[in-house]
Image: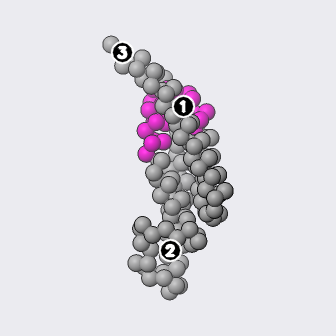
């Protein structure tokens, strides 16, 4: 078994995308505080105002984090057992995640939400495929 470094690269890319969104969020909020337009405590964690870009950015970041753990576990297991499907699916999973985030940043309306959901569905289906493909490989490895 060899580690698929391309899969690892895309897994790292997923984490870097989350970090990029976090940097953008911190920079946006920081600029508003430093400029005096908002107080530092004016960003409640559960308040969502779709018209506000920073609010949409916060949701895009949170949505990315919600799936990050699932991606790490499934892709990590696939890579550990040598499932090369991870290297083929992770680029598409990452592309769908970035697409979902970008649509989130553009705005909120019926069609944009539908497109965002389609990107999420792509990620879910590909992750399920990878998990189902990895499970029998893992079972073969743990047979006595």
Q: Secondary structure at mark 2?
A: helix
Task: List the single residue furthest toward the front.
Answer: 110
In this rendering, is residue 106 above or below 139? below
Disc 2: which residue: 29
Could you tell me if the residues under marks 3 and 2 are in contact, i.e. CB atoms within 8 Å?
no
**Disc on the earlier residue, 1 or 3:** 1
The residue drawn where x is 48% and y is 23% is 1
Q: Which mark is residue 6?
A: none
Provide residue 38's location: percent of width, then percent of height: 48, 82
Q: Residue at x 55, y 65 (%)?
A: 56
Among the 4 quarters of the image, the one containing residue 9:
top right
Tell me the residue that label 1 is attached to.
129
The residue indicated by pointer 3 is: 143
Q: Which residues are magenta?
A: 69-90
Q: Determine whether 140 is above or below 71 in the image.
A: above
Question: Can you name the residue that lies furthest to the top here?
Answer: 144
In terms of sequence position, does the residue under pointer 2 or pointer 1 come before the other? 2
**Quadrant into which the C terminus falls:** top left
Q: Nearer the viewer, residue 82 or 50?
A: 50
């Amino acid at each position: 078994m060899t580690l698929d470094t391309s899969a690892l690269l895309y897994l790292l890319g997923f984490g870097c995308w989350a970090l990029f969104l976090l940097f953008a969020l911190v920079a946006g909020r920081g600029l508003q505080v430093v400029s005096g337009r908002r107080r530092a405590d004016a960003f409640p964690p559960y308040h969502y105002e779709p018209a506000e870009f920073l609010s949409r950015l916060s949701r895009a970041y949170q949505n990315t984090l919600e799936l990050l753990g699932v991606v790490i576990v499934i892709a990590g297991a696939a890579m550990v057992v040598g499932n090369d499907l991870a290297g083929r699916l992770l680029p598409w999973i990452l592309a769908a995640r970035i697409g979902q985030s970008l649509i989130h940043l553009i705005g909120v309306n019926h069609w944009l939400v539908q497109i965002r959901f389609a990107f999420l569905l792509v990620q879910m289906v590909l992750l399920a495929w990878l998990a189902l493909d990895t499970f029998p490989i893992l079972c073969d490895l743990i047979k006595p």
